[in-house]
Amino acid sequence: MPVISAEMPDTPESNYDRLTIAEATAIQKDLRSKLSLIPLEKPVRTIAGADISLSLYSQTVYAGIVILSYPKLQVVAYSLVKGNTNFPYVPGYLAFREIPSILKAFEQMPVKPDLIMFDGNGILHKRRMGIASHFGVLTDTVTMGCAKKKLAGLYTEPGETKGQFTAVTDSGETIGFAVRSKNNVKPVFISPGHQMSLQDSLDIAFKCIGKHRLPEPTRKAHEYVNLFRTGALQEGYHEVDEWKLF
């Protein structure tokens, strides 16, 4: 894991809860200076989805990372962690509530995925530092975002059929895409997180779209985290054949 600058907490797990919004903003700006949007340099053989489940004002966080083969998108492993957060719910700063628990799920995985898709934003963010970018820079991993709602920027509504997309722009800069992942449903918002280009994020998103609105990595992460929350799955790291889970 890369060295964190003196302005940042040494360990997000223990320090993010104590930050003010001004301090959190300073961290985002510091991380942005380290952001890389160069094209993918290595082939992707495994892709993970990362998600959390928590109530709006709850302190309990259920976090999970589900690893899938790529491009077949078959589940091969998952990592689940239960944590707590005291950082307030503030739009644009949700990474500070979610990353500590997702980081624990990431750290308990003996083999890391080649790429992580987050249920959230990458550079499609006012300060270009959504959760996917934040986590990617912090851990020096390849990441991208797939959000259900637009966090920043402007776009023209894409066509109503699956596969249509338009660019999301902010101050003349393209920061992501509105993608129609299923006929006649609301678009999802795709953006690179770290160590990939805008085009990479769009190409991978399309290869991960199946029959549902959400791409398979984040859809599976959402499913597994909710199963964990209800007690159907147990905390820890598990290598699995997916059909044996249910």
Image: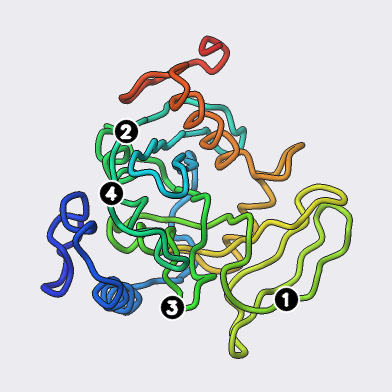
Q: Quarter of the image containing the C terminus?
A: top right
Q: CA distance from mark 4 to mark 2?
A: 10 Å
Q: Nearer the viewer, mark 2 or mark 1?
A: 2
Task: Read off the residue under disc 1.
Answer: 155
Position of 81 relative to 171 (above/below)? above
Residue bearing mark 2:
82
The image quadrant where one finds the N terminus is bottom left
Residue carrying label 4:
100
Give 2 or 88, whichever is nearer the viewer: 88
Q: Quadrant of residue 130?
A: bottom left
- Which label was assigned to residue 127? 3
Who comes first in sequence, dot 3 or dot 4? 4
CA distance for labels 2 and 1: 36 Å
Label 1 and label 4: CA atoms lie apart by: 32 Å
Instruction: Give the class, few, some or many, for how many residues have Cα within 10 Å of label 4's Cα (few <14, many ≥20).
Output: many
- Marks 3/2: CA distance? 29 Å
